[in-house]
């Protein structure tokens, strides 16, 4: 429903890649989708990878924090910073969707700088052997939900090494 609205009512086929990324086969539009609880989110972008994530805030995130937080991420958090934990998680989900090639370790390859948090902006970095990117991510907190998305207005720095 959200995609149909964003595409001006146009009909479309929605498919998924082997890594689960949704795409429109007859279009140059990049899309990203997310849902949590009673809410859904969608973003579209012309010819540029994108990502969006929405999550309902719940203290259960503390139980899985060891699976996605690295020392860099932790340097911006306090132990009881529930919203901060969600900002890191959501931003990493957005990076995962942006990269879209799979084989991403959230602790080893993804880093979230929360220093601009008061401006509703995060700096997110992907560091892999064949791919490096620094991406601006915006967020909004509404009630019990955190929404994050790639800020395409900010410069995205990508350095992809040629594979041998």
Image (tube, helix red, strand yellow):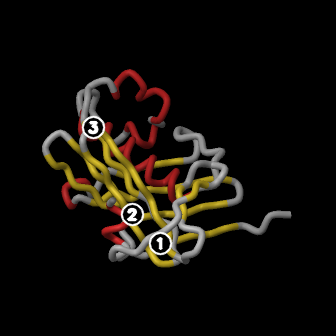
Farthest left residue in view:
143
Q: Position of residue 56 (x, y in %)?
A: 26, 38
Q: Position of residue 107 (x, y in %)?
A: 53, 38
Relative to 98, 154 lies left or right: left
- The image quadrant where one finds the N terminus is bottom left
Sequence order check, earlier mark of 3 and 2: 3
Residues at badges 1 and 2 in contact (C-beta under 8 Å)? yes
Q: Position of residue 160 (x, y in %)?
A: 67, 68
Q: Position of residue 34 (x, y in %)?
A: 38, 50
At x 24% / y 39%, what residue is drawn? 83
Secondary structure under tag 2 reads strand
- Classify 10 Å Cα crowding around label 3: few (below 14), some (14-19), many (20 and above): few
Secondary structure under tag 1 reads loop
The residue that label 2 is drawn on is 150
Residue 156: image tag? 1
Residue 47 or residue 82, whichever sits in front: 47
At x 57% / y 70%, what residue is drawn? 158
The residue that label 3 is drawn on is 37
Residue 30: image tag? none
Q: Is residue 137 above or below residue 83?
A: below
- Classify 10 Å Cα crowding around label 2: few (below 14), some (14-19), many (20 and above): many
Estimate the spatial distance between the alpha carbons at disc 3 and disc 2, rounded to whole Å.
22 Å
At x 39% / y 73%, what residue is drawn? 152
């Amino acid at each position: 429903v959200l995609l149909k609205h964003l595409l001006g009512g146009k009909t479309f086929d929605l498919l998924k890649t082997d890594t689960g990324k949704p795409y429109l086969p007859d279009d140059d539009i990049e899309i990203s989708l997310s849902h949590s609880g009673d809410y859904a989110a969608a973003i579209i972008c012309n010819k540029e990878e994108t990502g969006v994530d929405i999550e309902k805030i719940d203290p259960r995130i503390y139980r899985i924090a060891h699976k996605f937080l690295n020392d860099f991420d932790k340097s911006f958090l306090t132990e009881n910073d529930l919203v901060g934990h969600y900002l890191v998680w959501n931003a990493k989900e957005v990076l995962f969707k942006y990269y879209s090639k799979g084989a991403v370790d959230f602790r080893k390859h993804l880093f979230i700088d929360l220093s601009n948090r008061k401006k509703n902006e995060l700096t997110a970095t992907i560091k892999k052997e064949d791919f490096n990117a620094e991406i601006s991510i915006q967020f909004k907190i509404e009630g019990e939900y955190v929404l994050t998305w790639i800020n395409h207005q900010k410069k995205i720095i990508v350095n992809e090494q040629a594979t041998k």
